[in-house]
Amino acid sequence: MNLPGPRAGQRTPYPPVFIAGPTAVGKSALALELAEKIGGEIISVDSMQVYQGLDLGTAKASPAERARVPHHLIDVAGLLAPFDAAKFVALAEKAVAEIQSRGRFPVFCGGTGLYFKAYLQGLGAAPPSDERLRSELEAAPLARLLDELEMLDPVTFNRIDRHNPRRVVRAVEVIRLTGKPFSAQRAEWATRTDPAGETGGFVSGGGLPQSGLVFGLSRSADDLHARINLRVDAMFAAGLVEETRRLLAQGLEQNKTAMQAIGYRQVVEHLRGERPLAQTVELVKIKTRQFAKRQMTWFRRQLQLEWMEFHPDTTCQAAAIILKSRIDSVTAQI
């Protein structure tokens, strides 16, 4: 694909635009429309879309959509490769620099709140993972880890997603490695980031954006649930079971992070004979609705977003026009 360079008479770099929100809210479709209108390229903010092969269950952009607008940070990790927020930030910073060098807008889009926060506010000084300790914790019952977390750090215990073993393991790991509550350390790491950034208002992995181009999308619960149900049905109709079977043959179960992806985990259980397909489809819908609710709670508590509420009759084209106007007003002041 031949991409245009900086347009004559216009200043670069263009500030990044951020579009966050729960699964199935309409982020990807809006980002696609917006990127076409403003001359942008999309950076995926999704902890599962980074993995090669996890296509249907993560709702990756189709080849046709990627042909319309360049996408970054999709399929950047092998199925068995480790991937974390630090790697995301490093790759995102590289992508932003490349996109801006072409005189185009970086458009961050996704639902992984931790990745947004790591890029916008910095990674802090969390200790690196200890392989021996991590293996020990991953082998321990989740209930036992939660008991330990509640005793040593009740603040984190009350805030953490207790159904996400990966996050619970990491919290306990940090506590054991440092001897201090995870919550207290997160506060310390946050104070060491530069809230104004060092990039003239443009985000660069260590400061909050001053451009104001950080948007959150929302819908009513009934509307979002209906969209989730349709999406899950479409994923299964497109071949999610077959995709999961193929991934299992490639070692999917060896990647504990990828196995946490909603849809794949439930289909793996179905393939093991734990439940029939119809019940699996309904369970994926339930798990996805619960996940979307947790996402909304996290975004509202952790990030300062300019919220845009979608209605069933809201079109991505109309929403993109509104955001473009907002972007134009900001960039006019640069």
Image (tube, grey):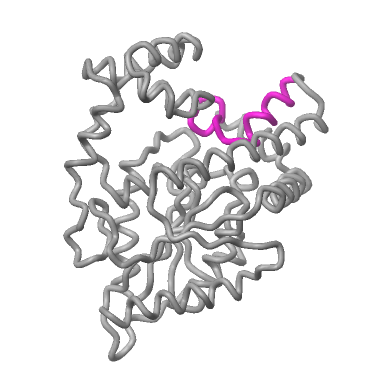
In terms of image quadrants, where is residue 62? bottom right
Splitting the image into 4 quarters, where does residue 185 fall?
Answer: top left
Q: Nearer the viewer, residue 310 or 127?
A: 310
Q: Residue at x 46, y 9 (%)?
A: 144
Image vertical order of residue 35 relative to residue 253, above or below? below
Going by the image, does 243 lie left or right of 328? right
Which residue is at 52% across, 45% downward? Answer: 296
Q: Quadrant of the C terminus?
A: bottom left
Does the magenta portion include 267? yes
Looking at the rendered structure, the number of numbered marks drawn on it comes to 0
Compared with 240, 106 (above or below) is below
Magenta residues, start to end: 252-272
| Left or right, residue 214 beside residue 235 | left
Image spot of residue 160 (x, y percent):
44, 28
Front-most of 107 and 255?
A: 107
Asked if residue 134 lies left or right of residue 279, the reply is left
Q: Residue furthest bottom?
A: 9
Q: Main secondary structure of the magenta part?
A: helix
Q: Is residue 113 magenta?
A: no
Residue at figure coordinates x 32%, y 62% from the top left: 96
Residue at (47% x, 76% y) in the render:
324
Relative vertical location of residue 315 with respect to residue 196 in this rendering, above or below: below
The image quarter containing residue 149 is top left
Could you say where residue 81 lies in the image, as x and y percent from the top left? 42, 35
Q: Is residue 57 above or below residue 167?
A: below
Is 26 displayed left or right of 46 in the figure? right
The location of residue 311, given as percent across then percent down, is 66, 62
Instruction: Locate residue 78, reporting x and y percent.
Output: 46, 40
